[in-house]
Image (cartoon, rainbow, N blue to C red):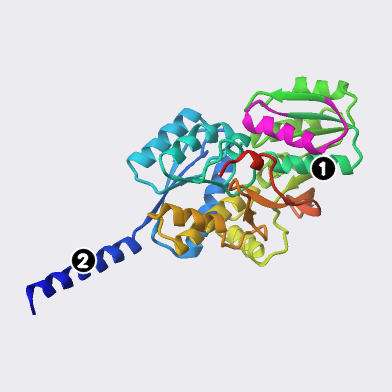
Amino acid sequence: MKMGNFALMGAIISAISVFSSAAAADTKVGMITTLSGGGAGLGIDVKDGFMLAIKQSGRSDIKVVIEDDQRKPDVAVQLADKMIQSEKVDVLTGIIWSNLAMAVVPSVTTQGKIYLSPNAGPSPLAGKGCHPNYFNVAWQNDSLHNGGGAYAQSAGYKNVFIMAPNYPAGTDALNGFKALFEGDIAAEVYTKLGQTDYAAEIAQIRASEADAVYFFLPGGMGISFLKQYSGSGVDIPVVGPAFSFDQGILQAVGAAALGVRNTSQWNKDLDTTTNKAFVKSFKAEYSRLPSLYASQGFDTANLLISAIEAADISDIEAFRAALKSANFTSVRGDFKFGKNNHPIHDVYIREVIQEGDIFTNKIIGKVLNDHGDPYSKDCKM
């Protein structure tokens, strides 16, 4: 054999070796979420849902690095930089809180990394601040609050007291409610993020002449408010998004939440094969019912897996196209992205019920069909 042929064969073998190595390369995921302090239950649920999907996929090539952001924006930014520069992650995910998302996501995407949000969906990142590297697998912040406004309107409420924490998701929440509610606003109140004493706000509600209260208080804030409200003697009906009536919150609040109506894009009784299997497997794995947050973590991981199966992550355009196609089976049923990479989906109204010793939700109707967000029109992608 001539030397030229040896050289050609060597080049071919080398190319095959490089291709095989690339095809077998790991995908490294950086998960920054809240695992301690107030709101830790939300981060733990996202993490557990995400890791359950990875486990079920059987893919040993997906490596997940997990860090606790302590619900602090500066900590989250430092962790993101560390993961990108030192850990060399390909994809980031996990953030629960919108103020942390606003600090982290623009930095991550401009460094050329993909960010998949399993929760926070602040309006600036859905509109003018949209980015082809940023995908929200949960909702845009306004979404469930749009459902709350639509439900309050259909229920015949005329004068609603609305309340949320003073941070980006809180502003989006009340704007989202007002967008689809045509009645009067008795008062619009913003509390401190992390607040646990609501005596002053309950006094305002009592004096407001409102015929309903709409509130968004996630995590421990919602637990504190509902317990205090229940014991206050104020009998004005309350409505809220799923974040204030989620599985973990309900166990802490107990009977005080029974009968309350709340909005969600998911519930454990959604009648889809994938959802039934998810609820069963999550309960078997973690000995508790899944929450809204767990369902979002599960969907986020399955979206990522579908993209890895369709495209090489080193080809960023092909990988983004694979994510955009959303070729996975969501626990919520049909799933698709709008042009700003935020979901278009149904929003349901749920009621808090008791099943044995467990407080949970059941779907009683649908309030919005194929609902997108109003900020998509400002996204230039």
Q: Position of residue 164 (x, y in %)?
A: 71, 29
Determine which of the numbered discs, if any, sits on residue 150 in the image.
1
CB under 8 Å between callouts 2 and 1? no
The image quadrant that residue 19 belongs to is bottom left
User: What amino acid type is highlighted by mark number 1?
Assistant: Ala
Q: Residue at x 54, y 57 (%)?
A: 303
Residue 35 appearing in the image: yes
Horizontally, residue 120 falls left or right of residue 73, namely right
Q: Position of residue 5 (x, y in %)?
A: 13, 75
Horizontally, residue 228 falls left or right of residue 63, namely right
Figure quadrant of the C terminus: top right
Q: Earlier in the sequence, mark 2 or mark 1?
A: 2
Viewer-nearest residue: 374 or 210: 374
Viewer-nearest residue: 58 or 259: 58
Q: Position of residue 20 (x, y in %)?
A: 30, 66
Q: Residue at x 69, y 64 (%)?
A: 272
356 in the magenta segment: no
**Which residues are drawn in magenta?**
164-186
Horizontally, residue 17 falls left or right of residue 67, namely left
How far apart in space, not on screen, are marks 2 and 1 (Cα)? 62 Å
> From what the image shows, is residue 17 above or below residue 378?
below
The image quadrant that residue 332 belongs to is bottom right
Determine which of the numbered discs, if any, sits on residue 14 in the image.
2
Which is closer to the viewer, label 2 or label 1?
2
User: What amino acid type is highlighted by mark number 2?
Assistant: Ser
Q: Position of residue 328 (x, y in %)?
A: 57, 62
Badge 1 marks a residue whose secondary structure is: helix
Residue 216 appearing in the image: no
169 in the magenta segment: yes
